[in-house]
Structure formats: C-alpha cells, structure tokens
Image (cartoon, coloured by chain):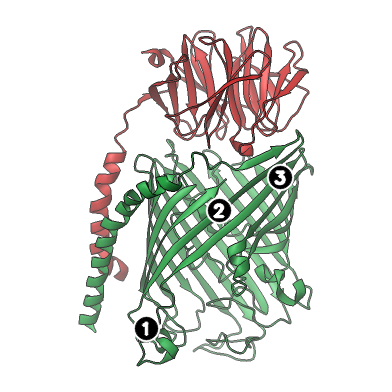
Chain colours: A green, B red
Amino acid sequence: MRNASLLKQGIYVGYMAILSFCIAPIGWLCIPFAFLFHTSSFAQISLSNGEHNLEISGSISCFYNKRIYYNQNPENRIDDNPTNPFNKGKDRFGLRDMQLQVEGRIGHDFEYEFQVDFADLANGDDIGENPGILDANFTYKALQVVNATVGFQKIPYSRNSLVPFTFSPYWQRAEVSRGEVFSRRDLGVVLSRSLWNQKINLYGGIFTGQGEQILTLNGGDNDPSGAFEYMARVDIAFPSRYRYRDYDINSSPIPMFQIGAAARTVNRKYSSFLQGDDYYLRVIAGQKDCYTADFSAQWKGFSTQVEWHLINMRPTNDIDPSGLRYRENRGSQTSKIGANPTGFFRAGGILATVSYASRPLKSIFSIRYDQLNPNDLVQDNTEESLTFAYAYQLKGFNSMIKAQYNYRLIDRKNPNIQRFDDQLRIGWQMLFR
Amino acid sequence: MSFVIHHSSFIIILFKLLIPILFFCSCADAQKLKHNWSKKLSISEPSDISLNQAKDGFFIVSDDGILFETNLEGIVKRQSPFRAFDFEAVFADATGIYVIDERTRNVHSFNPSNLSLKKTVEISYNGGRNKGFESLTWNEAKKVYLAFTEKDPKWAFELDQNFAVLNKLKVNGLSDISGAAFHKDKLFLLSDEDHAIFRFNPETYELEKKFKLKVINPEGLTFGPDGSLYVVSDDMGILFRYDSSPLFQ
C-alpha cells in the first residue's frame, strides 16, 4: 500500500510539474490560432429608445475532459465488469455553454432579464446544476425601501454561486457550491436593499423550495404541503463596494474585504427525495436548514475566498422516487442508521481559493481546496480535492483559454458510486457581452 | 495536517514557479501620484466631475442620473431638478453644462443659472449599455468636443458644437476610459481598471505617459482653479486632490 501510495504521489507530482510548465504555454501557443478568429470587439449590442434600453449578450464555451482512474471500482469499468478496461466515456469534448442573454431597463422603475443556455436545454437529463433556463425575472425598483425581483433567478445564498461562472478560470464550481447539495436557482421573490454606498447588501427571499426542478417537475407544482423556502443574506464590504467577483483582475491598489452570511429553510412534508446528480440532497422531503458564511479579499492582483456550508436535514422519506438512484442510506425518522440513531443528519463543507491575476501576463492562476461531506452519519464520507486552474486571457474574460486540474485528496468510501481520481479540463470560452 | 505533509512537495514546486512570475509582474513602471487632500462626498455613486465656469466649484454627476454643483471642497450647493438614468460624463464651459447619459446616449445641456434642462441631443451608439459614453471634454488643439466610450471598443468621438459626429477613432494603450480632461495643451484620460491617468497628445492621440493612482474605481477627473488635479471615485464616494505638476513633466 505504501508503495502504491508513493507511486501515486510520484505520478501526481510528475503530472503537476508537467502541467505547471505546460498549461501556461498552451495559452501562448494558442495566440496565433486565436488571431484567426479574433474580432476587434466583443461588445454586446444594446438598443434604446430613450426610455427602454435592451441589451443582448451571450457566450459559447467548449472544453476537453480527461478523467484519470486509479481505483478498482467495478463501476469504472465498461459494463461494470472488473475484467473490462476502464470506461473512458468521459474523455470527451463538452459543449458547456451556448447562452443567450437579454437584459432590459425601462425607465427608472423596471429591469428585466432572461437568459437561456441552449446546450443545457438540449441536455434534458441534468436539469439541476445546469438548467436550460438560467434567468427569467424582472425587478421593480420604485418601492421606496427595497427592490423586488420576481421570477426564476439565482438564489442570493452562496457567494460563490453568485459569481458568474464566466468570470472564472475554472471549468467547474467547488463541489459544495455547484448546486448538488442545495439548489442555486428557484422561482420566487427576492427583496433587496443596499446601504452605505452599496458596501452593505441585504437580501430576503421566498421560493418554491423545488429549486431548478420547478421548471419541469410535476408541471411546475409545489410540494403538496404548499410550503415555501425562505432565505436571507447579508454581506458587508470595506473600504468600498465589492462586486461578486473572485479575481482581482484590475489589481486593486487598496486592500478590499467582504464578509457575508446567509441562511435558508424549507419544510417539505410529502414529496420524496428529488433529483440530484451525485448526492440527491438538492431538494429533500422533510426539514432542510442551510447556513453559510463567506470571506473574500483582494489586493494587487491577489485574491482569496473562503466559504463554509452546513446543512441540517430531517428527512421524512428515504425512498428515492426513481428506485434506481438511491445509493446510500440517509436515515429518517423511521429508519435509523449510524452508531447513534438520530432523526437528522448533516452535510457540509468548505471551499477556499487563493488566486493571482496578472494583466501583463494576461493570466489568472488559482488554487482551490474544497471539501464536502454529504452525510455525517456515514463513516469515511468526506471527500476533499485540490484544483489548480490557469486561464490565459486573449481578450479579458471575453476570450479566455482556461485549464483546470482536479486532484482528489480524499475520496468517499462508498462502493456504489463511480469515482474518478483526477480530472483535467481544458477549453476556450468566448463571450459577446 | 496530513494534507500539508503529503502535498508539501507540490506546493513548494508551485511557489518556486509563481514567485518569479509574480515578481516580474510587480515591476510597475508608471509614476505614482499621491493625493494631498480628500473628501467623502454626500453624492451617491459619483461618476464624473468638471470645474464650473465661475471656477469656484465643481459639477459632479451620479449614476442615479442627477447633476450636482458643489464648492471646491465637494460640499453640495445645489442639484438639478431633472433626473435621467445613468449620468457618466459632465463638462462645463462658457457655452453651457453638458452631461451624457450612458444608458440612453443622450447629451443633455443645462442652464447654468438654475440647472434646468435646456436641450437634449442623441449620439447614436449601439455598444453595451454599461460600456457607452463615460467622458466628455473639449479638445482645444483640434477645436472639437471629445466623447469617449468606456471599452469593447474604446472609441473617441470628435463632435462639433452641436454634438454632431465629425470623426470616430479607436483609442489604444489603456484598458478602459472612465474620464477625460484637457489641460495645458495635453489630453488626460482616466482608466478605472488600470487605476491610472494617461497623458495623450491631443493632436495625434498618441500615448505619452502613464501615472498610477491609489484609488478604487476612479471615474472622473478635472483640474481646479489653481491647476490641482481632482479625481472622483465612484465606489469609494470620495473626491481626491493631487499636485498636478508631475503630469506635465
């Protein structure tokens, strides 16, 4: 075992040394290629009649995915047969984004936004993390005290979730915040207010609690209990407004800080466990209370984010509706598991990112540590990974070659799930915005 | 702790790679300006500034679409009754006070006596809503008004005295344009993303020199009656004053 571990570590160090030296030049090598497709302007188009302003923007991104398997899990093999070779179906090109966004401002009082990802619309299987409809909402700004945003929208809960994906050198969000353990979007109403020159942001919201599945599940119906999900968030920045961005691309001359905290709660009484791709925690039957806190700072190109999550779940039904996707016992009020039988379990984790953005090098370097335990009643159920990302900005975020290498530090010991050890993604994003 | 032990070798490799790169990046060449006075403004999201004609105060516009007049210390004396959407550029001269609404591309002219709206014309531009006209100034060298778009792309529109477009040129050498001013035969452009002022030749629009600022989100610049440089920060809501002599060396 020791030799195997050392071998793996050696392979890993070798991989990373090669990657560290090679990934950056990939960006340089792509420059001549990029000029073939390079347009002088990526600006979005806007139309205005003096009162109503409409803006059109969008994005396309595509990546190559390479997964590296070390473990002997049968599910990693073709036809789940241990005698067969590894199933390399995930070594592929992927169309991640094909987005169209329309935003409008009407006078002083109204704003609206709708955003569609056609790549995700075509992939109807993964409605959770990547719904085809990303935004369909409008904001009424004429209320004296707060702004009201109504419709399908991002839930202002996790700061990491609020950062637009296209402003990142990574191809995937951290495990804890990518929308597998809590829904990132839902239908509802958010009241928001900014104070102290936008250094303080306050949010309060009410949603269906169905998350992204509200777009498809049961024709868009709520849980039979009719219960809603409630959330609140506050964040404070100093010494100036701090936008929801993770990389100090403008090399802030003064240190900037932001701290935030949020909570959400829902009690769904009748529905079964609903979909999730890996953990089936996004929406559950029963009481689900989520808490998060975050810290972000940036200065002279360096930036860091730390985000912590805790989810308390008291399920009322442990039967997966499909009968096929149920992979581990969560426990319930009638079905106890673990050494200390309990009617609830916890999930949670953290993500921590350190990055450096360099305008002269047109590059972003970033390292992210993320940890997730989807069920604290199950032994050896924590997964940890370290992800290295590099982005070469041909034209800022508008044309960016980005690569990430995901190195799994510790895996969960669940024998029933297909696991990969490490993963490389490299690709190109182009935005017209 | 186990993570630190098992993966320390890689982290050492990584830092060995990064440190020289970061050192290279930190070798900034631009001259740095230090402010000698600052004042917290009572104006929300100030986005541009111009010296008034009496030279006893400033006109400052806000992202809320409001024109203010302040004294030289940044204290608000009065504000326009007219409210538009997103004012990003203001310029005042003997002929009037001119303000551009970035969202609608309208140039509003105001009566200096009571700051009432006098006239509105439109400069057509279909670029991004928030990447429209960010600055307006008078180029004495070419006897034209200059309106600059923020970025993607950075255009300089040369305008006649009725704000009709005479010429359109690309501007290079800076990441974005958030403010503009003409002073002592030089054209100065402000960049929010670069945190810097760039001196240009007003005849050829060639970049001559760069000056770094320690200000978050600088959005407007002007020169005071004594020649001091004033810079207003949107996100910080602060007016900064600088000795302008380094700008002309």
Chain identity of mark 1: A
- Element under disc 3: strand
State left or right for residue A181 relative to residue B11.
Answer: right
Look at the picture and state if B137 lies above or below A17: above
Q: Quadrant of the C terminus of chain A?
A: top right
Q: Are marks 1 and 2 on the same chain?
A: yes
- In three-dimensional space, the C-alpha distance between marks 2 and 3, rounded to whole angstroms, equals 18 Å
| Residue depicted at 75% across the width and 22% down the height | B120
User: CB under 8 Å between callouts 1 and 2?
Assistant: no
Residue in front for this viewpoint, A260 or A59: A59
Please state which of the two labelled residues, at mark 3 or mark 1, is closer to the viewer. 1
- Element under disc 1: loop
Residue under pointer 3? A104
Using the image, tell me which numbered label, if any, was put on residue A86: 1
Mark sitting earlier along the chain (3/1): 1
Chain identity of mark 2: A
User: CB under 8 Å between callouts 3 and 1?
Assistant: no
Look at the picture and state if A376 lies above or below A242: below
- In three-dimensional space, the C-alpha distance between marks 3 and 1, rounded to whole angstroms, equals 49 Å
Q: Position of residue A106 (x, y in %)?
A: 76, 41
Residue B213 found in image quarter: top left
| Residue depicted at 45% across the width and 47% down the height | A37
Residue in front for this viewpoint, A38 or A334: A38
